Image (tube, rainbow, N blue to C red):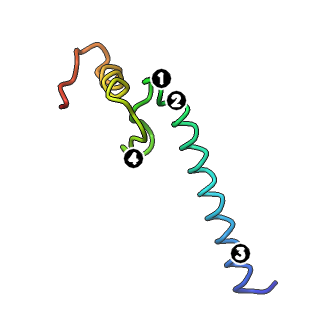
Amino acid sequence: MQGGQSEEQQADLENIARLQQQIYMQRASAAILPTGAMGQRGDGGVQQGATAQGLQQEQMNDAGGQGQQGQG
């Protein structure tokens, strides 16, 4: 073993894997967003290209039949 170098390589591999997963999740959510079904979910409240219609539908889904949520 080369000590420090292998630890750095391991950290790099973990960072790369994490970035690849984030990119995959962004692509997946970007593919879903135009349908308006998932405007805000699972990504820390970050909305990428979400339409107002998509957000309104998402709020209605979250309300669960309790009426529309009036969030400006």
Q: Position of residue 35 (x, y in %)?
A: 47, 23
Mark nearer the N terminus (1 vs 3)? 3
In the rendering, which numbered label is found on residue 32?
2
Q: Position of residue 66 (x, y in %)?
A: 24, 15
Name the secondary structure under disc 4: loop
Mark nearer the N terminus (3 vs 2)? 3
Mark nearer the N terminus (1 vs 4)? 1
Task: Using the numbered discs, state the Cα–Cα distance from disc 4 to disc 3 in whole angstroms.
Answer: 29 Å
Residue contact between numbered discs 1 and 3, judged by CB atoms under 8 Å: no
Task: Using the numbered discs, state the Cα–Cα distance from disc 1 to disc 3 in whole angstroms.
Answer: 41 Å
Left or right placement of residue 29 versus residue 67 in this view: right
Mark nearer the N terminus (4 vs 3)? 3
Amino acid found under the numbered disc labelled 4: Gly
Which residue position is annotated with label 1? 35
Q: Residues within 10 Å of mark 3 (few under 14, many from 20)?
A: few
Residue contact between numbered discs 2 and 1, judged by CB atoms under 8 Å: yes
Amino acid found under the numbered disc labelled 2: Ile
